[in-house]
Amino acid sequence: MNRLWLALLFLLWQASAALAAAPPPANSTTSVRIGYIDLRNDPRYRTDNSYTGIVFHTLGRPYPGAELGVQDAKLIGRVIGRTFVLERKSAATAADLPALAKELAAEGDHFIIADLTAPDLLKLADSLRGQPALVMNVSAREDSLRGADCRQNVVHLIPSESMLTDALVQYLVVKNWKDILALQGPAKEDAGEIVALQHSARKFGATVDAVRPFVLGTDPRHRDENNVALMTANSDADVIFVADSGGEFARYVPFETHSPRPVVGDAGLMPVAWHWTWYGNGAPQLQHRFEKLASPRRMNQGAWAAWAAVKAITQSVMRVRSGDFSKVEQFMLGSKINIDGAKGKPMSFRPWDHQLRQPILLVTADAVIARAPLPQYLHQTNDLDTLGYDAPESACHF
Amino acid sequence: MFAGARKSSSGGPSGLAHFLAAVLFASFISFPAMATGTGYVFVSNERSNRVTVLDPARDHAIVKQIQTDARPRDMHFDKAHKLLYVACGDDNDIDIIDVAKLKVIGRIPTGPSPEMFAIAPNGKSLYVSEEDSAIVRQIDIATDKTLNQITTGPEPEGVLVTPDDSRIYITSEVADMVHVYDTRKKKLIDNIMVDTRPRRFAMTADRKELWVSDELAGDVTVIDTATDQVKTTIQFLPPGFRPVDVTPVGLALSHDGKTMYVTLGRANHVAFVDPATNKIRAYILVGSRAWGVVENKKGTLLYVANGLSDDVSVIDIHAQKTIRSIATGRVPHTVVIDE
């Protein structure tokens, strides 16, 4: 087996040399530069958060997804006579972001993938206002970024909170598990998830019976807030939704509940943009390419979003056959784009809030249970728009 | 054919079977050229690792479920129809089925994850797309040796060798391109940009057009083979469907060259297209996620593999209607007929 692999690698190497000898493209090669900004010490990726000391590879940063996107586009670049160049800048503190962004823009990076929290993302976007630059959000899920706080120069590859809760609640309603007990963590993001859940419940006809706060700890004086069995007692709910963006509390909720109830949200059945167990629509090949590049990691949501960001850029450059920023941006945000995200339905950006419309996977730790939108939910123009805020209800005004 | 006939006569007092056997036997006598075929329909089932053998002469009864290696997908006969080659994606090989014995008698090792392949016109080698390593490998059938490797864009799928063996067309699903490989110069001579997620090929009867199914664009790109330029695209939209739900994959030209059959995947229909005018003549309802498609030689029946309803639809081509659906196994992929 080993020998076969070696032989394969050798042949591959030979073959790639042969491909390089293919005729040169008509245009001379010019580069399309893609910037990538993140924070060196982003607390969201700290692996020592966990008090059990278990390191989760699922926490990995999105960056390798962007690298894979560039790798996938190599051939496209050669055919259209352009090279796609990815340039990463990691800021030491959030205060350095505007300066870094200006540096990237000055170097000709019109597309800037941003792995930042919502406040930092806004800072970055505002510092680039009026410049030929598009910020591509791959990790901040806040609905406010697609609503009142939306920005003309930002697009969102990662799904919004309400897209995720809409996907989940569609499933719960189809199952007729409509009564939900919600557990809410102390983080601001947790509160956002609860607001999104309540919106989804109203939209699809489920009920959030109660929202109970939790804290992480073992203090017996606060057991009504740290003991899952106590917190979930006195409830007739069908399912327990846990809003815990950190995930450290959520992990211990399934099987700790007072009554035997399924757990959904940040544990149990989780709505996500991507999961390593997704097997349809060419996903296995994408997973394999990612795993080859980023071993021992598997592709997570952020990495998928970063890959999709690069795909949106490379597809647009290829289709307009131009590196001109305004032409490429116009195509990307227009109705003709057709991004293959390995999730089935072709994806495009919603003109009203620049959110990428996309299917959402409902997953457990090791399986995809369903893909939303569920077939029971239809929309007058695009079924993907049953997930998240639709045009008439959007608070975004560019 | 003899095996089938014998089986049906020993199977019970079925007058019809006897009659059909007699008819088949008669055709064997009068048309020796046709007689090499058993008439059997072969269906690969990706997830049950079986090739199902159906006998159209016996109301499509299942003759046998041939056990194969893991994930059987694309299938092609050798020229004499003595052997059937089956790409087995999860065991990294191509199984060789003896058509007379209906069992696997050998294997050709490939690289990881073979899906679609094509046999060279001289029958001596085959070209297989290996989606994980982004190559098309040419393998010598007699010796299993790799003769050549063509590096492609990510996720190569459809492979078509021109009948004169001068060119190989390959789709890259991720790069949205069709590669054109010159077998004499031994290099890629062109890359044709098509629509989103190109999957498979078919050529028109005059060989002047190459049709490519674009799964995520809901259309077929028509390429002029003389210039390698895109001539036109044909958009599909069966009544009641949204454009995003139309995912064309399978393509097959009718034996008379007058109809191109296009399976529409998630839209659960097959389109009948007139290649002379590019007009869509009909949409026929089939099972769920229609991919593989093949017409019988008489041009009366069309078989369609439905990956997500685990069955094969049989269409009466004249009546433009599905007349049967036959459960074959989990995730049917490709259908071929030995005739």
Image (cartoon, coloured by chain):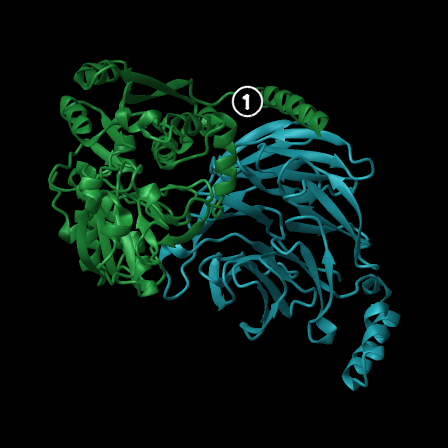
Query: Considering the image in quadrants, where does the N terminus of chain B appear?
Result: bottom right
Rendering colour (chain A):
green
- Residue A337 visible at all: no
Q: Position of residue A124 (x, y in %)?
A: 18, 24
Report the residue at 55% width, 22% height from top. Answer: A23
Q: Position of residue B200 (x, y in %)?
A: 56, 47
User: Which amino acid lies under the numbered mark 1 shown in the image of this protein?
Assistant: Pro
Query: Foreground residue, B236 or A38?
Result: A38
Q: Which residue is mark 1?
A: A23
Q: Position of residue A99 (x, y in %)?
A: 19, 14
How crowded pointer 1 is (Cα within 10 Å; few <14, some 14-19, many 20+) is rated as few
- Image position of A180 (left or right of B5): left
Query: Foreground residue, A166 or B131?
Result: A166
Q: Look at the picture and state if A251 lies above or below A261.
A: above
Secondary structure beneath label 1: loop
Q: Position of residue A189 (x, y in %)?
A: 20, 38
Circle 1 marks a residue in which chain?
A
Quarter of the image for residue B304 reads: bottom right
Quarter of the image for residue A339 reads: top left
Q: Look at the picture and state if B61 lies above or below A106.
A: below
